[in-house]
Structures are given as C-alpha cells and as structure tokens.
Amino acid sequence: MTTAAPATGTTTAARVVDAVKVYGTGDTEVRALDGVSVGFPAGRFTAIMGPSGSGKSTLMHCAAGLDTLTSGTAFIGGTDLGALDDRRLTLLRRRRIGFVFQAFNLLPTLTVAENITLPMDLAGERPDRTRLDAIIDTVGLRDRLHHRPSELSGGQQQRVAVARAFAGDPDVVFADEPTGNLDSRAGQEVLRLLGRTVRQTGRTVVMVTHDPVAAAHADEVVFLADGRLVDRMPDPTAERVLDRLKAFEPAPSTQGAP
Amino acid sequence: MTSTRASVRISLSSLRAHRRRFVGTLTAVLLGVSFLTGTLVMGDTLRASFVALFGNAAGGTDAVVRSTNVVTVSGESEGTRQPVSTGLAQRIGQLPQVAAAAPDIQGAGQLIGADGEPIGGQGPPTLAGNWIDDPKLNPYRLAEGHAPSAPGEVVVNRGTADKGGLKIGDTTVLRTPDPVRVTVVGLATFGGEDGMAQVTYTGMTLADAERHLTPKPGQASGIQVRAGPGTSQQELVDALRPVLPPDTEAITGQASAAEDQDMISGAFLSLFTTLLLVFSGIVLLVATFSIHNTFAIVVAQRTRENALLRALGASRRQILGSTLTEAGIVGVTASAAGLAAGIAIAAGLQALFPAIGFPFPDGSLVISGVSMLLPLAVGVVVCIGSALVPAVHAGRTAPLAALRETAVDDSAASRTRAVTGLLLLLASVGVIMTGVLADPSVWLSAVGAVLALAAFVVLGPVASTCAVRVLGAPLGRLRGATGHLARRNALRSPKRTASTATALMIGVAVVSLFTVFGASLKATMNQTVDRSFAGDLAISAPAFGAGGSGLSPRLAPAVDRLPDVATAVGLGKGVAEVNGSGRALTVTDPAALAAVLDLGKVDGSMKALGTNGIAVSDTEADKLGLRTGSTTRLTFTDGKERTFTVRAVYGQPELAGDYVITRQAWAPHRGQDSDSLVAVSFKDGVSAADGRSAVEKAAAAYGNPEVQSRGEYAQSSAGGIDMMLTLVYALLALAVLIALLGIANTLTLAIHERTRELGLLRAVGQTRKQLRAMVRWESVLVATFGTAGGLLLGGFLGWVLVKASEGAGDTAFAFALAPARLLVVALVGITAGALAGWRPARRAARLDVLRAIATD
C-alpha cells in the first residue's frame, strides 16, 4: 500500500509491483516475469502486447489472481492478492473480476442466460435486473438467451462471454486474446463492444493481444518483452503499434528499454 | 503381419499412457474373476475332501447289507429304509469269506450341552447309533476314554463335546427324542477330524441303541461286513447274496461310500456351489456394464487420436484391432490376477472355516483345469465382449474427426431405442402376466424376467434424461448453482449416465428381489401360522431330517393331562408310497386335531379314522381323484401294503400336511418315533402366563424343548429366512461395490474430459468446495437413478417370483414389499453414490486452474 502507483492522478483498478514469476528450477528455469511494475487505471481500456514468450499472459494471470507471483505483489484495487488463500481468491474473482478467454468461455450445459449470470449464481446472489437487461441489450443477444452455446456462432459466444464478464459489475475485466479465434468481422464487433462498454459506463478492461488492430481499440498499450515492461503507448493506432512491435524483432533480448 | 504388429504396438503404448483409466476396469474384472475362481476351487476342494473323508471312514467296510424296501419322499435326499434283523449279523459272521459283521443302528439323538442348551440341530444331522467295536467297521475312532460297555455310557465325537462343553465323565441328556440320561465315557474322531463337518455323533451300546433308536429290539438299519483275507468286495457281496433273506441286498463298501458322497455333494455341495456361481454370474454381469462404459468413454475421448491414425493411413481393421487388443490385455492381466486372488480366497476360507467351528477337512486345495481355464476365459470374454461395440465405433472414426473439436456423444436416446425398449417391456409384461396369472409357469416367468431386465437396460438412456430431471429438480433449489450444474452434468450424456447406472441398477435389483421374496416368505409363514394354528402354544423341535431329533411322542399326552390344558396334540411324521410315489404322512390324533389346527373346510369326519382310515387335503385328493369314501393303497417302508379308506377331505394342509393317519395305523410300520410339533390349547379362562409356565414345567421332563406362543412360533418358523438374506446381502455387496467403482471410474474419465470447463468454472468464481460438491452431487444423482431403477425392477421381479412360486406350488403365498428394508437399500445406494464421487471430486478440486484454461 505504501508503494506509489506508477500511474499517478487516477485510481488504479489493478496493478503489480516488482512482479517476478519463475517457472522451473536450475537449468530449466524460465523467468516469465522479471520485475514488472505496472498499474491499470480505472475506467480505461488497456492492452498488453509483446512478442510470444514476453510474459504478457503470465502478467495477466498473476494480476487476475489466477496464478501466484514468485515475488512481488499484485493488487486488485487495494487488496493484496498474495495475502489471500484459495477460497478468498476465488471469491474475489467471482465478485470483483470479469474474464473473457480466447476460447471455451461458456459452459456447454448452461443456456446463454445462465452462462451470463453464472458468477452471481455461484455466489448465490440475485443479479441486478436493470444492469443485466442493459448488458444483454448492449451485446445484442436478447433473442438468444435460452439457446445453448453450441447453437451460437463463435462471435456470438464471445459476446456472451463479454456480457458475463460485465454482468456482476466487476472492478476490472481481463480479456485474454478475446478475438484470437474469430474472423476479423466478428473480432471487430467484440472489440468495439469492449471499447464502448468502457467509454459509456466507465468500466476497466485489461486485454492481452498480439494483434495490432485489436490493440488499437484500447486507450493505452503496454509493451512487454522478456518479462519486462518496455514501453507504454497512449492512444494507439494499428500502424504505430505495428511499428513498435517491429522494433523488438532484430535483437529483442539485448535491446533493453527505449 | 506388420499391420497386426502396429495394432499391438498402438494398444500397448496407449495402455501405458492411460494406466489410470483402466484401474477401475482391472479391479472390476479382478473381483468378478476371483469370486468365480474361489467358488470353483472351494467347491472342488470340499468335494475332494469329502471323498477322501468317506473313503477313509468306510475303508474297512467291504459290504453293507440292508433292506431293499425304501420310501423316498420327493425333495428329501435320503429315503426311509426298512430295518433288518440284528440276528442277521451273526448268521453272516459265520460265512468263511467274512472276517467280521456288525449290526449298524442309525438314528437321531440330540445331546444337551453343559449349559442346558441342545447342541447343533440347525441343519446338519444329529446322529446317534451303536458303537461298533471292530475299528475297521466303525468310521469313528476312539481318541480318548473307552468304548461304551454299560447302559447309559456313550462316546461322543470330539467336536460335539467341545461345542457343548462336555468332558469325559460328564452326565447329560440325549434326546432320542425321549430324554435318556447318558454319561460320556469316550471321545471319538472321524477320518482324523473332530467330526464330520457339523454333524454330531453319539455312540451307545448295542442294547441301548436298540432300546432307544429302534421301534423294537432286534432291528438295525443295516449290517456292516468286513471280508476275510484274500476276498474282494465283489466276491464278498457275491458270497453274501445266497444267505440273505428276501427284500434284503448287499452292496460293496465302495458303492455305499459313493452313495454317501453323492448325498453330500448332491444335496449340500451342489446347492452351495450353484448359489455361489449364480452370484459370481451377477457380479460379472455388473462388471460387464462397468467395463463397457469405460471402453466406450476411452474410445470417445480418443476420437481425435484415432482419426489422426486413420488420416495417416491406419485401416479400420487396425484401429478396431488395437482397441480389442487393449481389451484383451486388460482382460488377461485382470483375469490372471483374479485367478490368483480367487485361489488365495479359497485358501483363506479353508483356514478360516475351522476357526469358526466348521471342521474343513485337511488336504491341499484342488485346482482343476476347469477352475483355471473357465474364470480366465470368462474374464477375457467379458472384457473383449464389453469392448466390442466401442471398438467398432473406434474403427468407424472418420479421418476428418481429427480436425473437429472432440465431441462427446451427448446424443439423446434414439427413437429406435425407445421403440425397441418399449416393445421389449410390453413383451416381458405380456409373458410375465401369462406366466403368473393365466397359466402359472416358473419358466415363462423367468423368460419374462430376463426380458424385463433387457427392457430396462435398453430403456435406460431414454429414462435417464427424464429421471435425472425429476430426481435432480430439488437440487437446484437446495444447492443453488452447484446443484443445478450437477444436474446438468448428469443430463449431458444420457447414454453414459444410463450405462453407468445400469451396473448399480442390476445389483440393487437383485438385492431388492431377494428382500421382497424373503419378506414374502416370512409373511407367508406368519399367515400360515395365523390361518392354520388355532392353539395357544406350540412346542416344536427340528425333526430328524431338519437336524434335530424331534419331540417325545409321550410329551403331548403329558401336556394334555395338565389341568390348564384343554387339548394337546402331537404331530409326527411318517412316510409311505401313495399310488406308487413317496409321500409324507402326518401321524397324529386326528379327532383332536381340529381343536388346535384350522383344517379349513372338512368334508367327512376326522373323528374315526381308526387303523384303516386316512384324511387327505383337497389338492392332493383332486390330483389322485380321491373323494370321501374312496379307497387308496399305501405301501410302507416295511414293504407292507394296506388299503385305506378316505374318511375326510380338508381344505388347509399348511400345518397338517397332505395326508393324516392315526398313531394306531402308523404304529406297525414306524421307525424311531418322534413328533415335530405339539400344539396346545388352554382351557377357557386360563391366562397365557399361567398356562405357559405349567406347560413349560411339564415339558422340562422331556428334554426341555422350546415352548412358544403363536407369535414366537410364527417368527421362529421364519427365522432361517433372515439368515439366508444376510448371506445374500453379503454376496451382493461385491456386485454393488463393483457398480460403485464403475460410477467412480466414469466420473474420473468425465472430469478428465471436462478439464477446461472445470478450469473456467474455477476462474469465474467456483470455490473448490463448490466444485467438489458439484461432482459428488452428480455421482449421487447417477446412483439415485440406478438405485431407483433397481428398486423398481427388483420389486417387480420379486412380485413375479412370489406369484410364480405360488402358481407352481399350489400354496397360498403372501406378497410383502418390506418397505422399511427397501428404504434402507435405497439409502445405502444413494449414500454409496456420494462415496463413489468422493475421490473423483477431490481430484477435480485439485485441478490447476491455469493448466485447465490454457490447454489446447
């Protein structure tokens, strides 16, 4: 709590401080995160980018309480995730975090409506009807509420996942390559949905992606390479992101921070 | 050649990779095969031991002389034979070929132990006879003390003495059934053991035996003969034949021993091994369903792998071959292990039996080729047979399936299945109704029962959707999202849910069937006593055939003389051939019978049967075409044929039996005399307690038999049924255990399949506890479905069995559902379901969230 947030002035919905994540030991040791400190401001849409193996997924998993750090701390709002046991962490994910994964976002046995309210159902809470209605209308799936996921297209399935992520009014929504399995048109639709939700209702979204076009929908892009934070880019466009990524390619490991 | 080798290599590597998945299958086959092996080995060993035992025991007897007049009542293992004269032994002894000849008197005699309780008598015979001094002619050997020489002296086999706490020098009572005071002067062994299984033996002097065990002195059951040196058994028999009186025969000692063996193996061992074989069949049937399910799931999970192999050029035959090889390897491994376990079980039982007081003859285990090959073959066939359909499915995998997302078969039940199942059900109900109601036949009912089982199996998937929806309905409300998800999971693959539950269903069905049948038997006995027993007290003792020595015929008159007693009537047993076939007769005082038994509608009079009158039940009368006033011929064991006139035809033969004659009519033909029941009614105004204590006091002088009220009498008649049920439950516990292993196995495989789903659930906020509960509730739902189906099927088949028995046996049979017991069965089934889900639930909860959501 005493450590100053890197992004000052605005509140941060989620942040990591000196995050280190090591997999394996000895010869097989891999440092997926090597001392990353980054905050994700509330009410903003942030994209995490980097070449494969840069640690961007690991960063997201640790920030979202799906994985634990080897050292360093991760916060959701003011809560130190490292201090929570598995049960409290699960309850935190249920109440304060929304998730959109690349694929397999929905339970095949549940209807669309049941999938959307799943986290609240698990908590045994009644969903807020007005907020739920608003979200269902935003994602445009009112006529599909009683269908099974297998009856929906890939794009529709991802929109259901987006609706579920926002339905519980979470502090932050983490999206892991949400458009990775979609064609470009369906992907665009999902990204616009994420952006629109952030801007219209002041939500916070953190998205991991390797696609510059997807990243361009964000308010800011943070670049990771070799487990380190190497750059931040406000108001990105696809071309600028692409250029920045190209800069990693010649000798990514020795270049260091710009 | 090479293609086969590829199949084998593929199956071996896949077995290695998925060892865990086959643990359940292996266990199921192993348990089934070991049960089967154990049964076969134990049966063979027991049989061999008995052969050795009789061989040893009868080793010195070269010939047996006995009467040819014998009456065998159907259903009894040994006929009643006319005695021979003891004087015959002396005559035979003078033949040059004969070294020794001794009369052999065999009768019933139940010893009273040091604690005042009778020893044995719960089935195995309580034998008494004359102690034969020639050690070669006597199967019993004196181990301690001396042979009986004075009146009242007896030798007892050591097992009996130990059980009754009797020592040499002790004085006790022998019920023959008249109480005889005896003193134990010696202890004997039989073939080196403390006794012949649970049979009790008392040897007395020849004079005592003639006095107490035969109707008149000078009679013996047979003559044991030993040949002189150089005379073979057959030569001895040939030499005996000319000196024998008419209606007497001589058989070799070997033939006699073979008859005894046949009796034991026929009556006791066959029943015992058949029962066990039936249960191993049930266990293996249950195992088959479990195994089939495992293979079906494994093949489904491997669709992509198989499709890849197909795409790379593997032929259908190779894929099919590799799956079947896999099943074969599992079958052979498990069966071999089961074989070893089965032999170990038999060895363990051999060691255990003596410890619980059942002298199991020494000798090595007999492991025949059949008891090796049969279980092995059954195990392998069960495995390969169960894998056949899944293997064919595997062979049909389209190469393109490699490109698709792995799809688990979640198709609902097809219309064909529903129609086939319903037709089967209709057919079974039709056949059963015909077999039960229209034209009573046990066989037709059995065919119907098999059809009903098939219908239930076929209809399983159709019913599972519906049933799980209904059974699981309260779950969502009670357990929220967790319950809701569990219900949905149980619903997602109706075929799998059904076949998992089927194994349990069969186990529970058999349990319920026996529960219902047992309860009905008990109810029937209660009803019989209720309907037919009009007295206040019953004094009963197991008769000779049932392991006791019966009641003294002098007890009834003694009780009848008591001031509190209005009537006391003794019922004894006789045998005779009526119209050429052996029948049991009830020997009693027919005139007084109506005071203590309700005989139903009586046509004619029971009052004056005399020495040539007989009363017949209406069913037997109908069969033989007899009416009041008509005559019939009875042939007794002494070869005498007498004409009897039917004086009465009565309606209720349940306690009175089918034929009633007077003591006077029976007396000339009788053997050792005994009653099996004395029915007592009090005078008006006598209280139950007063009457009872008076009767008990009087009975004490007659070997202290048990005096029971009507209710107690009804209960003790049904006592054996609870023992049988306990045995059946113990045997079926194994089948239920295998079914539960099947549920656990299916769940484990399902969890493997749903890794990503479980990861997602954990990510969006399902706690470990909720996840565990979700898996357990799914298990409970499947188990509940199986249990419910089993209760339904078992209850129905129980009813069928009761009705079919009633139709086949001419006796009224009560049907009792035993709701309390069935409720216990249901609770056990459901609880066991929760237990089966325990391990899979724990494994699921340990799942790493990241691995689950990241896997591709």
Image (spheres, grey):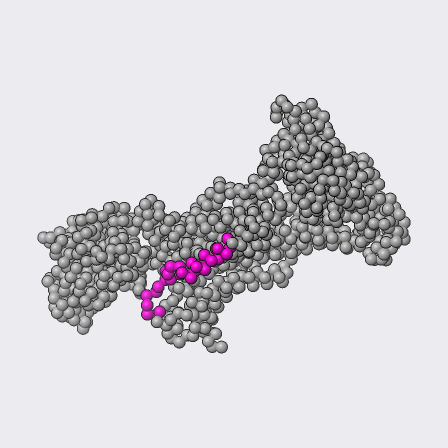
Horizontal side of residue A76 vs B92, given as left or right: left
Spot occupied by residue B683 in the image (x, y as percentages of width and height): 65, 24
Q: Residue at x 28, y 59 (%)?
A: A149
Let me know if residue B2 is in the magenta part: no
Spot occupied by residue B551 in the image (x, y as percentages of width and height): 71, 35
Spot occupied by residue A153 in the image (x, y as percentages of width and height): 25, 63
> Above or below — where is B504 with respect to B202?
below
Q: Residue at x 87, y 44 (%)?
A: B87
Which of these two is toward me, A171 or A115?
A115
Q: Residue at x 53, y 45 (%)?
A: B516
Let me know if residue B411 is in the magenta part: yes
Q: Quadrant of the C terminus of chain B?
A: bottom left
Residue located farthest toward the left when viewing the structure as drawn: A9
> Above or below — where is B482 with respect to B397?
above
Horizontal side of residue B854 vs A254, given as left or right: right
Q: Residue at x 61, y 49 (%)?
A: B808
Spot occupied by residue A60 in the image (x, y as percentages of width and height): 22, 58
Which of these two is toward me, B682 or B327?
B682
Residue B790 visible in rendering: yes
Q: Magenta stretch? A: B401-429
Which of these two is toward me, B467 or B694?
B467
